[in-house]
Amino acid sequence: MNFKQAVFLVIAISYCFSASHEHRTPRLSLLRGGLRKRFINKPTTISGSFTEYFYDQTLDHFNYNPQSYTTFKQKYFMDFTHWDGPQTNAPIFAFLGAEAALGPDPRIGFMTEKAPLFGALQVYIEHRYYGESNPLGSIKKSLENTTIRGYFNSAQALADYAELLVYLKNNLSAHNSPIIVVGASYGGELAAWFRLKYPHIAYGALASSAPILYFDDITPQDAYYSTVSKDFRDVSESCYKMIQNSWSEIDKIASEPHGLALLSNKFNTCRQLKDSDELKDDLSYWYAAAAQYDAPPTYPVSQVCGGIDGAPNGTDILGRIFIGISAIWEDKKCHNLIQDTVDETSQGWHWQSCSEIVIPFAYGDNTMFPQSNFSLSDYLENCRHSFGVEPRPHWITTYYGGQEIKLVLEKFASNIIFSNGLRDPYSRGGVLQNISHSLVAVVTADGSHCLDIVSTRPDDPEWLLNQRKTVVRIIKGWINEYYATLNATHKVTL
Amino acid sequence: MNFKQAVFLVIAISYCFSASHEHRTPRLSLLRGGLRKRFINKPTTISGSFTEYFYDQTLDHFNYNPQSYTTFKQKYFMDFTHWDGPQTNAPIFAFLGAEAALGPDPRIGFMTEKAPLFGALQVYIEHRYYGESNPLGSIKKSLENTTIRGYFNSAQALADYAELLVYLKNNLSAHNSPIIVVGASYGGELAAWFRLKYPHIAYGALASSAPILYFDDITPQDAYYSTVSKDFRDVSESCYKMIQNSWSEIDKIASEPHGLALLSNKFNTCRQLKDSDELKDDLSYWYAAAAQYDAPPTYPVSQVCGGIDGAPNGTDILGRIFIGISAIWEDKKCHNLIQDTVDETSQGWHWQSCSEIVIPFAYGDNTMFPQSNFSLSDYLENCRHSFGVEPRPHWITTYYGGQEIKLVLEKFASNIIFSNGLRDPYSRGGVLQNISHSLVAVVTADGSHCLDIVSTRPDDPEWLLNQRKTVVRIIKGWINEYYATLNATHKVTL
C-alpha cells in the first residue's frame, strides 16, 4: 500500500471501524473510547423512570411481497414522568435512535432536562438492526444475509419511526399532541429528514450536529480534515507543525531495520504494527476524535497539544506525539489500535456507508495531514469487495435533497433546528445559516459534536447554556404556534 | 350473494375491473368506454414533435439486496418544441403517468397548450408496471410473480420519477430549470405527493382531481356515491327516483322464472346474466361514470336522465332505464358487461388497490343506490383471497399524511394546485379549500373529473376556460418567484 492509499484509509478510519482493515468507511457516530464518555454520560440528576417496550415493526415498508410482511421486534422506551397527558395535548419528544443500541438506560440529557419544561412525554426508539431491534438477533447475522441486510437503510428506519409514532399516538389517544423529534449526528440527519418527509407526524425537529450537506458535491470534500487541522492550529501552531512533520518521520523509522518494532514499542501498541499505515490510521483517528469532541471542560485538542508542546526538552518528535496522543487514550496496559476494535456500531455503519451514506472525505492542502483526494471509484470498489454490491452514492441527495437548500426549503418546510458547534469538523457539512424564520441554525463558535444535547454539567460555559436556552425558546415558540393553530382550526371545523 | 354484498361489489366495480368477478376494488383512473373518449382526446391542434426514450430504472429504491439492483426499462417521452432551453433556466413540465400505458401519443392537452406560454420542455413518464415500463414484459407476468409485484407501489413510482428527473436535469444541464409536475386522478395524487416528498426536485405541482383525502376516515365513506346521486337529482328528480326504484324491480324480475333471460334481453347483454347483481353492478358503474365525467358539451348525466324521463309514455321502469343508460353506451351489436372487460389497467389497479390504495366506499342513506356499508374486513379478505397478502390500509396516510391537512401543511409546504370540479364524485375526497396562499384549491361548481387538464375545445364554457387561466396564472406566479429567489440566492452565493 502506498502512502496515498494509506491516507485514504486514514480518512476512512476516523469514522468507521470495520471488520476489514482493507475497507473502512466514514462513520458519523459518537466515538468510542475515552472521549465518548463525555457524550454518553447519564443525566446527573435522573428523575422519573422509563419502561422498555417492543413493537412489531414492518420489515419492508416499500414492498408488498410476502417477505416484506415479516416483522421484527423494535425496542423503544417511554418515560411518562413529566407528561401532562393527552387531555391537554401535551407534547411528545421522540428521540430517534442512530447507529448504536439504546439502553440499558437510553436517556439523553436534553430530553430528560427539558421534558419537564414542556410537560412532555419522552420516547426513545432504537434504530433498526442495532441493539435488540434486529430481525435476525445480531447485526452479524443480518449482515451475512444478503436479503435481510438490504432492508437496513435510512428510508426504512424513518418509516419505522413513522409507523411506531402513529401507533403510539393512537394508542395513547394523543392525536393532537405535537411530536418533536430529536436526534444527533446521523440521528440528527434522521430527525431533519423525518420532519421533511413526515410533517404530518413530527411537528418539529431538533437536528443536532447533523451534516445533511456532506453528500455528493455540496460540501468541499476536505472540509472535515481542514477543520480538524484548524482546531489544532488554533490551539498551537507548533503542535500543528509537529503533527504535520510526524508522518514522514513515522515512514522513515518504519522503513529502517526493526523500525516497526521500534514504533510499536514507542507507541506501546498491544501488538506489533504490520506497517506504518496502521499507526498513521490510528493517530489520525484520534486527532479527528479530539477535534470532533473538543468540548469543555477537558478540551481534548488542548490536551493533545499540551502533551506535544509540553514534553521535556530533548524529547524527539515521535516521543512528543506519543505524550500528546496518549493524554486522550484510556488504554490501561497497552494501546489497542482503533482498527482492531470491532463492535456492532462499526459493523452496522460499515454496511450503511457501503449502501447509501457515502460521505466523500478528502485531505486538502491546508491540513496537517498529507494531501489526498477522495476516489469514488476506489470507494465503490471497496464496498463491492466487502458486500458484493455497490453503494448508491447519489441516493441520499435524490431522496432527501441538499443541493441549493435555501432555494428549495426557504418557502417549503418549517420547524427544524440545525444546531452545530464550529469546532466539530462535521459542522462544515451542517446547516450553518438560517434558511427561513423557522428553519434555523443555532451555531456556537466553541461547540463540538452533539454537545448541545448531552447533559448539563455544573461547569458548562455560558455560551453552551445559552445555546440550549435558545433551542428551548424556539421549540416553545413552535408549540405555542401549534396550539394557536390547532384551536383556530378546530373552531372553524366545529 | 345477498344484495348487500352485491352492493359492495357495485361500489367496487365503478372504479376497477378486475379479473375476478368476486373481487373488484375501487379504481381512480379515467374510465373506459364511450365516456373516456372525451378525456383522452388528442390536442386538436398538435404542434411540435415528441420522442420516445427508455431509462434504466432501479427496481427497488428502498433496498440494497442484490435483486433490488435489477433495473427495468422505463418509458418516457420528451417534446422540446417549445423549450427555451437550459441557458435561460426555462421550466420543465413533467407529466407523471398513472395507472395506464402512455402512448403511442402520450400528450395531454394542458401540457401541449400551456408549454408555449412558459417556454417549457414537456416530459411524460410512464408509471412503473404499466405499458412498456414493466420489469417482466407484461402486467400479467409481473402480477403472477409474488416477488416482482411487491415493488409495484406509489412510493417506488415516486422514487422512479425522482431518479429520472434528476438524471434528465443533469443530462440536459438544466440544473436550475424549475420542474412543475402534472398529474390527474391517481396521477394527481402522485403529483401532490411528489411535491411534498421531493420539493428539491419539483418546484410545484398541478394535482388535477386528486382525492388525496379519500383514505382512512378523513372523508365520509359515502361521499362518492352521495355525490353521484346528487348529480342525478340536480338534473332530474324523477330520473333519480326512477333509478332508486329500479333495483327492486331488477331483483323482482330476476327472481321470476326466466327472469334473467328477460333481463338479459331487455338490456341487450352479449351474454346471459348469471344473477341480478351482474346487471346492478354494470348499471351502477355507468351511473357513476356519467357523474364522474359529467362534462360539457354532452353532459352524460343529462343524457341518461333525458333517456329515462323522455321515454315514450307507457314505457316500463326498466325500459326507461335501458333507454337512459344506453344513451352513453357505445356497444355496437350488444352490451358487454363492464365486469367482462379485463385490461392492463384493471389488472394493475386491482393489485394497487389490494396493496395500498384502499379507498373506503360506502353507499349512505342519501343515495339513489341501496344503502350499504364499507367493510374493511371483507375488503382485506377479498385481497388475501386474490393475492395471498393483505393490503396495508393505513400506509397511505402514514407515508403521505392527509389527516388535519390544514393544520399540518399551512406552514409547511407550498406550490400545489388542487383542481377539482364538484360534479366529480371524487372531488369530495380532494382538497377543496385553500390550505395556504400557495397550497390552493381551484374549484369549479360544474366541472368534472380531470376536465381542466384535457384539451381545450372550441365550445368550452367560460368557467372552464377561466379555471385553466387561473391555473396558468398561479404557476406563472410560482415560476416568477422562483427566478427572483434563484437570482437573489446566487447573488449572495457568488
Image: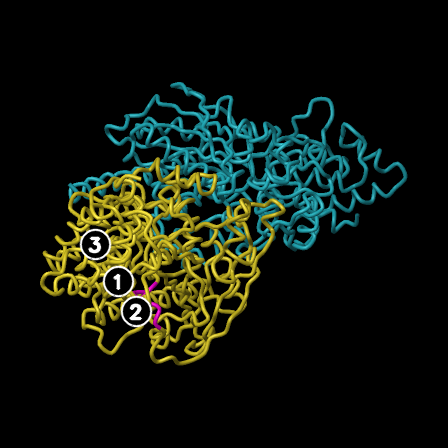
Chain colours: A cyan, B yellow
Tell me which residue sits at (47%, 59%) in the image.
B130
Q: Quadrant of the N terminus of chain B?
A: top left
> Residue B38 has which mark?
2
Q: Is residue B270 above or below residue A318?
A: below
Residue A130 in the magenta stretch? The answer is no
User: Could you tell me residue B339's position as x and y percent?
Assistant: 36, 53
Q: Secondary structure at mark 3?
A: helix
Amino acid type at mark 2: Arg
Q: Is residue B50 above or below residue B259?
A: below
Q: Secondary structure at mark 2?
A: helix
On whether disc 1 and disc 2 are found on a single subunit, the reply is: yes
Picture quarter containing residue A415?
top left
Which is nearer the eye, A346 or B406?
Answer: B406
Q: Left of B374 or right of it: where is A465?
A: right
In the rendered structure, the residue with mark 2 lies on which chain?
Answer: B
Amino acid type at mark 1: Tyr
Residue B37 in the magenta stretch? The answer is yes
| Residue placed under numbered mark 1 in the picture | B293
In the rendered structure, the residue with mark 3 lies on which chain?
Answer: B
Which is nearer the eye, B290 or B488?
Answer: B290
Tell me which residue sits at (34%, 72%) in the image.
B41
On whether disc 3 and disc 2 are found on a single subunit, the reply is: yes
Magenta highlight range: B33-41
On whether disc 1 and disc 3 are found on a single subunit, the reply is: yes
Q: Left of B261 or right of it: where is B237?
A: left
Whether residues under marks 1 and 2 lie with C-beta atoms below 8 angstroms apart, the answer is yes
Inter-mark Cα distance, 3 to 2? 19 Å
| Residue placed under numbered mark 3 in the picture | B228
